[in-house]
Image (cartoon, helix red, strand yellow):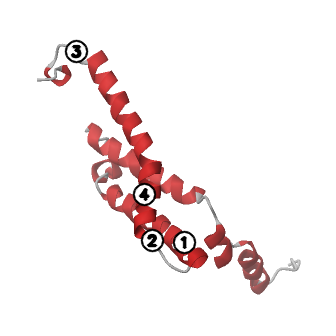
Amino acid sequence: MKPTGHTPGMRNSRLASRLPSYEDYRNAAFFASLDGLRCISILAVIWHHTGIHTSGLNLARQGYLDVDLFFAISGCLITALLLRERDRFGSISLRDFYIRHTLSIFPLYYAVVLTYGVLVLALERGTPAGSFK
């Protein structure tokens, strides 16, 4: 058997050198893997609400669990933001935090509500869903 020059300890040290440090995590502005998980959890909830269930795909029946996953991930991201604020300013201002995040979320919220209203008026006119009564 030919020696490879790799020992288990060398393999683990190389893996550890590729992992981000705590400082890298704290300084990261974007967590692609967590955004991907949030996307999957949102799609699973939407799939669950469509009522389409395929045999063998049990996750489609458990989309309600992905709401928990979404909120757990969001909690991690919010905690990271609050820890950064505390490190930067020495304290956390919940008032400023809520103002910043309200201003970042509401434009998209209103865009979705407006789009929904236009679609209902365009596609459901003359039905109970499309009436203003």
**Residue sitting at 41 percent across and 69 percent down?**
94
Front disc: 1 or 3:
1
Decide which of 71, 1 is in the foreground and name it.
71
Residue under circle 1?
85
Q: Amino acid at mark 2?
A: Ser
Query: Tag 2, which secondary structure?
Result: loop
Residue bearing mark 2: 93
Disc ID at residue 125: 3
Residue under label 4, please give it. 99
Q: Residue furthest left?
A: 133
Query: Mark 1 or mark 4: which comes first in sequence?
Result: 1
Residue sitting at x 35%, y 30%: 114
Question: Disc 3 and disc 2: Cα gap in Å?
Answer: 46 Å
* Mark nearer the viewer, 1 or 4: 4
Label 3 near label 1: C-beta < 8 Å?
no
Residue 6 x/y as whole percent? 83, 80
Mark 3 vs mark 4: in front: 4
Q: Is residue 74 visible?
A: no
Going by the numbered disc 3, the residue's amino acid type is Arg
Please tell me which of labels 3 and 4 falls first in the chain: 4
Measure the alpha-carbon separation of dots 3 and 4. Answer: 37 Å
